[in-house]
Image (cartoon, rainbow, N blue to C red):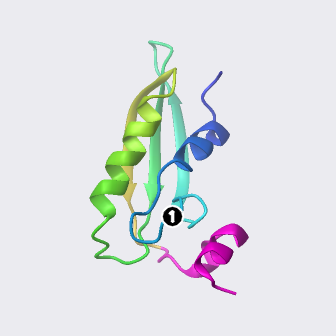
Amino acid sequence: MAVSEEVVREELKKVIDPELFVNIIDLGLIYNVTLAETPEAKTNISIDMTMTSPMCPAGPQMIANSKQVLTAVEGVGEVEVKIVLDPPWSPDRMTEDARDQLGIF
């Protein structure tokens, strides 16, 4: 299986925000995914990720979990997770499923 943005986003659904109990994709925390092929036939991944609040205490755990699930994918080389705060996160970025799970209508 080739590493693609779709594969990366699907794998990141395994990372759950420990405070909200919703995955980081459905929460809308992943802004950009950049893939770069290496000479060793691996794919390096760079992710722009935000938090629901600038001082989110779960941030380090979600970053570590993101790296863990992605490095387990065959063909993945290095994984970089950059925290960005611009644009700021808002509930508008959440999927319908996440809104339903959190009772936001």
Position above or below: 80 against 20? above
Quadrant assignment for the N terminus: top right
Give the magenta range. 87-105
Position above or below: 80 against 53? above
- Based on the displayed image, in which of its 4 quarters is residue 31 positioned? bottom right
- In the rendered image, residue 25, in percent from the top left (x then y), is placed at 57, 58
Residue shown at 46% from the left, 49% from the top: 47
Q: Could you tell me which secondary element the residue under label 1 belongs to?
A: loop
- In the rendered image, residue 59, in percent from the top left (x then y), is placed at 32, 62
Which residue is disc 1 drawn over? 29
Residue shown at 43% from the left, 65% from the top: 50
- For the image, the number of numbered tags is 1
Q: Nearer the viewer, residue 58 or 90?
A: 58
Residue shown at 60% from the left, 46% from the top: 9
- In the rendered image, residue 87, in percent from the top left (x then y), is placed at 49, 74
Label 1 amino acid? Answer: Leu
In this image, 71 relative to 94: left or right? left
- In the rendered image, residue 23, in percent from the top left (x then y), is placed at 53, 59
Position above or below: 11 against 94? above
Q: Nearer the viewer, residue 32 or 104?
A: 104
Quadrant assignment for the C terminus: bottom right
Q: Nearer the viewer, residue 82 or 97?
A: 97
Position above or below: 104 against 15? below
Q: Nearer the viewer, residue 97 or 88?
A: 97
Per the image, is 86 magenta?
no
Residue shown at 48% from the left, 65% from the top: 21
Q: Residues within 10 Å of mark 1 (few under 14, many from 20)?
A: many
Residue lying at the far bottom of the rendered structure: 105
